[in-house]
Amino acid sequence: MTSLYAKELEVAQLAVQRAARLTKRVFHEKAKGTVSKDDKSPVTIGDFGAQALIIAALQHHFPADEIVAEEEAAQLRTDAPLREQIWDLVSTTQLDDVAAEGFLGGRIPGADAMLDLIDRGNSPGGARGRIWAIDPIDGTKGFLRGGQYAVCLALMVDGDVKVGVLGCPNLPVDDAAPLTADIGANQTDEGRGVLFSAVVGQGATSRPLGTGALAEGKKISMKPITEMSSATFCESVESGHSNQSDSAQIAQKLNITNPSVRMDSQAKYGSIARGAGDIYLRLPTSKTYQEKIWDHAAGDLIVREAGGQVTDTTGSRLDFSRGRTLAANKGVVAAPAAVHGQVLKVVQEVLGL
Ligand SMILES: Nc1ncnc2c1ncn2[C@@H]1O[C@H](COP(=O)(O)O)[C@@H](O)[C@H]1OP(=O)(O)O
Ligand SMILES: [Mg+2]
Ligand SMILES: [Mg+2]
Ligand SMILES: [Mg+2]
């Protein structure tokens, strides 16, 4: 008997692997083609291209599913040179395994079809039916500086995450490698690139992020914390994304002396899920910012399937049924299930909740 969501998982893993291949080409071969979005956050030709390739694979296998994706094609419809640059990348990025590439549905027919695929990611989300969440490059700032970033894809059914996949091209392949911060733009790809996956009720896995067919996966699990004082926090590089002075106070109250490891993107969820690093805190920096579902859906499931608990700072589970944002949540506290309550209590003391 094939297991539940087996096809969704295979499509998602291969689609992420292909999209990650595109992002690596952008990093190594191209000027990054950075443009500013309305909110002043950066977006690159890699973000648009990766989103197009992932949606093409989803469209091929699951044409009736809805998609919530970060980017939109509006700017590309009026900027022909930018559009052509992206089309050049998308039309020449394949998996190098013919069967795997064929399974994803092969090439997108043309640049206009590519724009329409990008705009298929405009679903409002919600609590009903099958909805995919895509962050084609999470941690664009990390990507640009040669640090951590992730290609993120998750399937939600009736508001619950059922399948989650994270491609992390710059994390060490070795699950036991020590947790380090940004790798620096001048390091090679040797020994780097991990694909994390989870299906609800079936555990979490990691495997080398390849360029063709999927490599063999192995089960991952969070590291049990025997001494809280020797735990390591993961947090954002960007102080505007998570309050780093609050997290320092929380660490101090837990008698944690290890410096927190700062890395961009959902690579933090993957890192704690495989026991490199223990606790991921995302502490609100503003009263109004609403987290986006594509920044958390895959990581939330991967950590929970690896033996973790993920809540917001009030102790509620992340609620993916509210639309494109986590409108009902504030911040994120992810930790091994056995110590999550202890960590949350100190988070709430420090935040005055
Ligand atoms: N004020 C904010 N608080 C929390 N997260 C934010 C904020 N502004 C942007 N982000 C998002 O944080 C994510 C990166 O997280 P991390 O710090 O963990 O690497 C990005 O997806 C980014 O969204 P955007 O894509 O709009 O830049
Ligand atoms: Mg962005
Ligand atoms: Mg993101
Ligand atoms: Mg993004």
Image: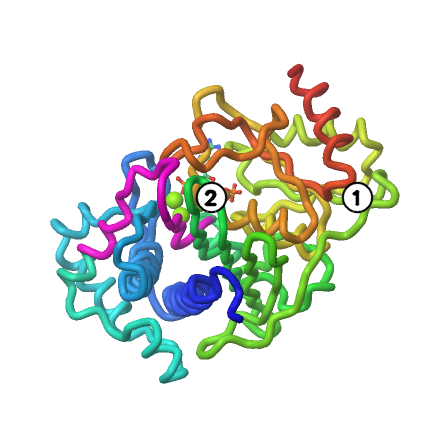
Query: Which residue is located at x 37 percent, y 48 percent?
Result: 130
Q: CA distance from mark 2 to mark 1?
A: 24 Å
In the rendered structure, which segment of residues is drawn in magenta?
A: 116-138
The tag on residue 178 is none
The quadrant in which residue 32 appears is bottom left
Q: Amino acid at mark 2?
A: Asp
Query: Which residue is located at x 42 percent, y 37 percent?
Result: 292
Q: Is residue 82 left or right of residue 196?
A: left
Q: Is residue 80 left or right of residue 1?
A: left
The tag on residue 295 is 2
The residue closer to the viewer here, 80 or 197, is: 197
Respond yes or no on whether mark 2 lies under 8 Å from ligand 3. Answer: yes
- Identify the residue at the far top of this view: 352
Q: Is residue 98 above or below residue 301?
A: below
x and y percentages locating residue 281 in the rendered image = 63, 36
Q: Is residue 285 left or right of residue 261?
A: left
